[in-house]
């Protein structure tokens, strides 16, 4: 109540002092930053594409043998699911991606720690990994088939390599790029080497690690698509490769949709974990 | 805790012929200096006069710097930097407790935060603090270790004028309560006069002036008698009337 009265007296008292004409001279600056982000705006783009696809198919503008209608793809998908082949293929692909990813993740982290925290490790590892990076990993497929046979091992090995490289690079860069001011602080506070690594270096390197992790997750799916289309006897890629031989575009689209959904899901999962682990960062950006 | 009298008999910091050089350029040129225990000393100098080099030498942070001379400093030394240097991924209390362990560490950390006026901000992230609050947290982090010697490298240099005045009061208050030896590196003559019992001017790698300021605390920035000290310090820093 009291606040209300003070406000009124304030405005009436201030009015004669600040004429309206003067107030109007204050020009509001042009806003250069984009406006506030709406919650689900990211989904608008894909929804528009889907709508266009539906409309064009219904209007008969698309050749069904080149691009089948969305409902055809759905029907094929549920038919393959009921027949049991689709769940089998998805499971095989998921297993490959997950195993390769797990090995690549572990390898990337261990190598980055060894190379980022010790000079000996850096001398031995960093150059070697960069050499490995310079060789296109998919170019290793023929050699790996000769070494490991055409079974599961070589596929998992290739995926692991595709995954470990971005994780290593980003984690190593973050570990060795630790702010020298924080190193000095750790010295002043008499931290032991172990405390320094656990309380300063590793938390400081986590943002870089997560960049690598997201690239690695995407990489595992990319590697999988290629591997399963070249040398596979099962899995989503194999299913699509077979469909190509029989001209079943709807089956190919089912495969693409599944790949897309899993890629999106795994990336979102990493982002949710990232936001939780790096919750201290939100206070800066908000 | 060692008895007070014993602390007063032996200087906290003793430098004999301390020399430091970077790439052939002599920054500290044979400094002899005693800092008595429990005294608040300010070290003035131009930028590049070697005051930070001296502080870092005493803190034992000058790895790979060439130099000679003798240096003795207490076991428990804390450093406050110009930036608060709080780890952004640790909450304020965890930052204060960095490197501290033991059962009552947390209680001491909370007490230290209360002393600097940050009670209730224990669980805040450093990114949520204002510049003055962050520097208070940094002070708490150095105090919680009960230092015998507190080295402060332009601790208020990045703060606005009003916050700086408030921090001067806080530092003096904390010093009176805990009585560590303090070496305050600053380029602000008024800050040195208001806070310190003794002001040193570092000039070309040597102590150019050693001035004891014998005035009661709290001192006012407008005290005319302090003007005399200001003139002498400015003269030692090479600032004369024509320059102003």
Image (cartoon, coloured by chain):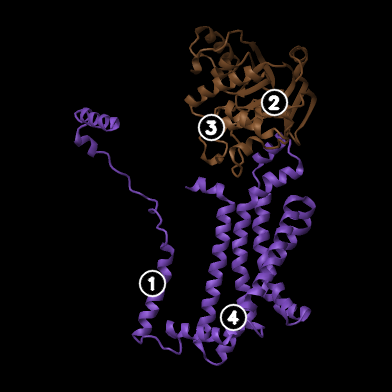
Chain colours: A purple, B brown
Q: Which mark is residue A48?
A: 1
Disc 3 to disc 2, how far (Cα)? Answer: 20 Å
Q: Nearer the viewer, mark 1 or mark 4?
A: 4
The residue singled out by tag 4 in the image is A87
Near mark 4 (Cα within 10 A), the count class, few <14, some 14-19 or many ≥20, is some
In front: mark 2 or mark 1?
2
Q: Residue at x 74, y 58 (%)?
A: A110
Q: Are marks 2 and 4 in contact (CB under 8 Å)?
A: no
Badge 2: chain ID: B
Give the secondary structure at mark 1.
helix
Residue A25, by quadrant, is top left
Of the numbered discs 1 and 4, the one sitting upstream in the chain is: 1
Dot 2: element = loop
Chain holding disc 3: B
- Does the residue at mark 1 contact the one at mark 4 (Cβ under 8 Å)? no
* Residue B146 marker: 2
Residue A57 in percent (x, y) is at 38, 84
Q: CA distance from mark 4 to mark 3?
A: 57 Å
x%, y% of residue A30? 33, 48
- Asked if the residue at tag 1 contacts the one at tag 3, i.e. Cβ–Cβ closer than 8 Å, the answer is no
Chain letter of the residue carrying label 1: A
Crowdedness of circle 2 by 10 Å Cα count: few (<14), some, many (20+)?
A: some
Would residue B234 be visible to someone looking at this image? yes
Percent x, y of residue B199: 63, 15
Please tell me whether mark 4 sits on a helix, a strand or a loop: helix
Q: CA distance from mark 2 to mark 1?
A: 64 Å
Query: In the displayed structure, does residue A282 sit left or right of residue B37?
Result: left
Percent position (x, y) of residue A225? Answer: 60, 77
């Amino acid at each position: 109540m009291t606040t209300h009265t003070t406000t009124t007296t304030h405005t009436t008292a201030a009015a004669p002092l600040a004429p309206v004409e003067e107030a109007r001279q204050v020009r509001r600056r042009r806003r250069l930053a984009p406006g506030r982000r709406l919650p689900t705006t990211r989904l608008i783009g894909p929804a528009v594409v889907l709508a266009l696809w539906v409309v064009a198919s219904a209007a008969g503008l698309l050749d069904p043998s080149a691009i089948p209608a969305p409902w055809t793809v759905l029907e094929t998908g549920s038919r393959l699911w009921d027949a049991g082949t689709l769940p089998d293929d998805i499971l095989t692909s998921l297993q490959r991606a997950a195993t390769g990813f797990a090995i690549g993740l572990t390898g990337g982290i261990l190598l980055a720690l060894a190379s980022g925290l010790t000079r000996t490790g850096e001398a031995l590892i960093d150059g070697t990994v960069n050499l490995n990076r310079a060789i296109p990993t998919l170019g290793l497929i023929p050699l790996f088939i000769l070494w490991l046979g055409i079974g599961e091992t070589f596929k998992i090995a290739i995926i692991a390599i595709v995954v470990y490289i971005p994780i290593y690079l980003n984690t190593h860069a973050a570990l060795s790029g630790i702010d020298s001011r924080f190193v000095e602080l750790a010295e002043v506070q008499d931290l032991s080497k172990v405390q320094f690594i656990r309380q300063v270096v590793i938390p400081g390197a986590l943002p870089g690690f997560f960049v690598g992790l997201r690239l690695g997750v995407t990489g595992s799916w990319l590697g999988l698509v290629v591997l399963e289309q070249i040398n596979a006897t099962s899995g989503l890629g194999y299913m699509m490769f077979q469909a190509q031989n029989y001209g079943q575009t709807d089956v190919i689209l089912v495969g693409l949709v599944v790949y897309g959904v899993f890629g999106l899901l795994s990336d979102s999962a990493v982002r949710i974990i990232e936001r939780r682990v790096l919750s201290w960062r939100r206070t800066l950006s908000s | 805790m060692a008895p007070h009298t014993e602390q007063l008999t032996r200087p906290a910091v003793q430098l004999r012929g301390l020399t430091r050089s970077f790439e052939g350029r002599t920054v500290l040129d044979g400094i002899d200096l005693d800092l008595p225990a429990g005294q608040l000393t300010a070290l003035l100098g131009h930028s590049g006069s070697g005051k930070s080099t001296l502080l870092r030498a005493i803190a034992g942070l000058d790895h790979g710097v060439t130099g000679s001379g003798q240096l003795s400093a207490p076991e428990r030394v804390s450093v406050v930097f110009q930036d608060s240097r709080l780890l952004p991924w640790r909450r304020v209390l965890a930052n204060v407790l960095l490197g501290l362990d033991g059962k009552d560490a947390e209680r001491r950390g909370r007490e230290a935060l209360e002393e600097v006026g940050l009670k209730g901000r224990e669980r805040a992230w450093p990114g949520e603090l204002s510049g003055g609050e962050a520097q208070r947290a940094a002070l708490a982090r150095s105090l919680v270790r009960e230092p015998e010697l507190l080295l402060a490298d332009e601790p208020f240099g990045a703060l606005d004028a009003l916050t700086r005045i408030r921090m001067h009061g806080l530092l003096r208050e904390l010093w009176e309560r805990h009585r560590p030896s303090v070496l305050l590196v600053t380029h602000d003559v008024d800050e040195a006069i208001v806070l310190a019992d003794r002001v040193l001017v570092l000039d070309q790698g040597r102590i150019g002036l050693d001035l004891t300021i014998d005035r009661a605390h709290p001192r006012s920035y407008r005290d005319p008698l302090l003007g005399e000290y200001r003139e002498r310090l400015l003269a030692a820093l090479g600032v004369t009337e024509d320059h102003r």
